Amino acid sequence: MVYGFIFLVSIVSVIVLFLIRKVKSEKLREYLSTAIVLIVVGCIMSVFACRSCAQAFDKFIKLASFFSILWIALWVGNALSADFLNEKISWTVYPVRRLLVGLAATILFTVVAVYIIVQFYRLALDYHIRDVSEMIYSSLVITFLISMFMHGRAFLINWKETALTAEKLKYESMTARYESLKSQVNPHFLFNSFNALTNLIYEDKDLAAKFVKQLSEVYRYVLDTRDRELVSKEEELKFLESYLFLQKIRFGDNLRISIELDQVKTDFPPLVLQMLIENAIKHNVISSDQPLTVRIFLSNNFIVVENTLQKKKVLAEESAGVGLSNIRLRYEFLTKQKVEVEESTEKFVVRIPTIVRTPT
């Protein structure tokens, strides 16, 4: 009768496992499938653990239910514990700490769960497990072996995901730098620069010569930094000085830039400040009646680029949507801190994290 019951449970389990495949939630599907398998395992273990149970169906049912509940409880509890610890302690950043804390949590939960289930069967069902310490020891050994396998699997999965994420971010950073270069060397910028230069040649030859020198400095910096992840503050500000010289020729006193970074220690992804200023120039009205003010300063470990908001009704050039997304992608690659963007009725603010390279 017992063997027939086990066979019936196995057949029903196969059918249920087939039906569970239609459940949409992957997590729920995993939990249900494992629970069904553990019930079958509990039934089979009962036959080997208690030879007399093959002739006593009531004893078999109690022992089978005990093993099934025990293994389901241990699996669910340890799985939830692992999920919680994965959120709190990174496998890739603190692998040894994660392993030790995970093993400690597994041992503690296993001992407590086995003791509670044994006492529940003793008090509620008057079913006594003869050697509780042996049951705890056996459960610990089996759970420990399974946990070591699961911990190793979790470490490899996390390591693989981290490696893939790093490669993805590296690719996105390279793409962002390329887009930054492409957006800098664009026909509109060249047209505006050469148009301003044409007027200067007739008005002030010395200023025209200086304009050409500053224009060459801009493009030299673009070419020199296209393969670099970070540049020093001094390099970025020197480049920005050349870029702003060109824009001042075009806009005069209608463009007002304030840079307050003298005491700040930080590095920048190349062209970041220039892109933010260019973004402000592109999207806002600049005139004697509505001068554009841009302020760059430090606040709470963020470099803040803040400009007055006076949006153009129609953009003179189509926005490629590269600017802010470009900057966000590069900072995702370089730091865990996020780029923050805030827009009010009067101001547009972008906060970029400070980055200080450790000496090598």
Image (cartoon, grey):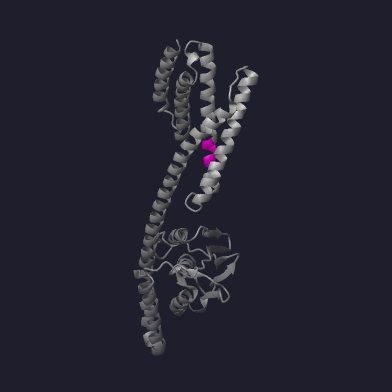
* Span shown in magenta: 78-84
Place of residue 276 in the rendered image (x, y in percent of width and height, measured from the top left)? 48, 67
Depicted 28 relative to depicted 50: above or below:
below
Which residue is painted at 50% across and 63% down in the image?
Answer: 311
Which residue in the rendered view is the most extreme toward the right?
123
| Residue 194 pos. (x, y %) | 36, 78
Q: Residue at x 48, y 27 (%)?
A: 35
Is 267 in front, or is 178? Answer: 267
Q: Is residue 256 above or below residue 17?
A: below
Q: Is residue 210 visible?
A: yes
Locate residue 203 relative to residue 254 in the image: left or right: left
Residue 241 horizontal/vertical position (percent): 47, 78
**Magenta span has 348?**
no
Answer whether residue 81 is magenta in the image.
Answer: yes
Is the magenta region chiefly helix, strand or loop?
helix
- Residue positioned 40% across, 49% down in the render: 160
The one nearer the camera, 253 or 268, is: 268
Q: Is residue 81 left or right of residue 12?
A: right
Q: Residue at the spot x=40%, y=87% of the render?
A: 203
